[in-house]
């Protein structure tokens, strides 16, 4: 069975779940292949599509999501709008002092969740 560029292709904007956000996508001559359909690959794909690229995703599994689809602990995003909407006050105090990576999560996590949602 041969590989079709459209087999794993994000294709046109109408086939994308985030196309309903009101962002209009126009395809350019730039063609990009993203290897891996996990969170990083899908995030890269979204960014590329927003810049007008024609993107093909190559994924070895039958479903997209990668290890992120198996994550059970969630994303550290203290103070995100999702938490605020649920009435949760969280400043990430439990993560402060756990190292540079943890502090980066406290600082950047809410922005990352906003972008993902």
Image (spheres, rainbow, N blue to C red):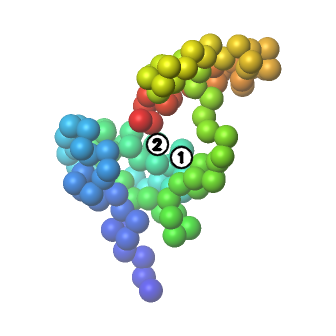
Identify the residue at horizontal 51%, vertical 70% (top origin).
62
Q: Nearer the viewer, residue 26 or 20?
A: 20
22 sits left or right of 108 in the view: left
Residue 29 — which label? none
Q: Give the residue at mark 2.
A: 43
64 sits left or right of 30 in the view: right
- SS for dot 2: helix
- SS for dot 1: helix
Circle 1 Cα neighbour tier, 10 Å, few/some/many (<14 / 14–19 / ≥20): some
Identify the residue at horizontal 31%, vertical 45% (top origin).
18
For the C terminus, the image quarter is top left
- Coordinates of residue 61 in the picture (x, y in percent): 56, 67
For the N terminus, the image quarter is bottom left
- Coordinates of residue 75 in the picture (x, y in percent): 60, 34
Q: Give the residue at mark 1.
A: 39
Tell me if residue 117 comes above or below residue 91 in the rendering: below
Q: Nearer the viewer, residue 42 or 90?
A: 90
Identify the residue at horizontal 50%, vertical 59% (top origin).
64
Q: Residue furthest bottom?
A: 1
85 sits left or right of 90 in the view: left
- Coordinates of residue 27 in the picture (x, y in percent): 23, 49
Task: Specify the quadrant of the image occupied by residue 60.
Answer: bottom right
Task: Please report contact status of discs 1 and 2: CB closer than 8 Å, yes or no.
Answer: yes
Q: How far apart are the alpha carbons under marks 1 and 2? A: 6 Å
Circle 2 Cα neighbour tier, 10 Å, few/some/many (<14 / 14–19 / ≥20): some
Q: Is residue 16 visible?
A: yes
């Amino acid at each position: 069975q041969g590989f079709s560029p459209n087999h794993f292709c994000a294709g046109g904007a109408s086939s994308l779940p985030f196309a309903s956000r009101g962002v209009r996508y126009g395809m350019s001559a730039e063609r990009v292949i993203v290897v891996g359909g996990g969170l990083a690959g899908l995030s890269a794909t979204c960014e590329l599509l927003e810049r007008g690229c024609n993107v093909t995703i190559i994924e070895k599994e039958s479903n997209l999501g990668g290890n992120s689809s198996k994550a059970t602990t969630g994303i550290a995003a203290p103070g995100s709008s999702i938490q605020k909407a649920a009435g949760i006050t969280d400043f990430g105090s439990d993560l402060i002092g756990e190292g540079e990576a943890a502090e980066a999560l406290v600082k950047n996590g809410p922005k990352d969740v906003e972008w993902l949602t």
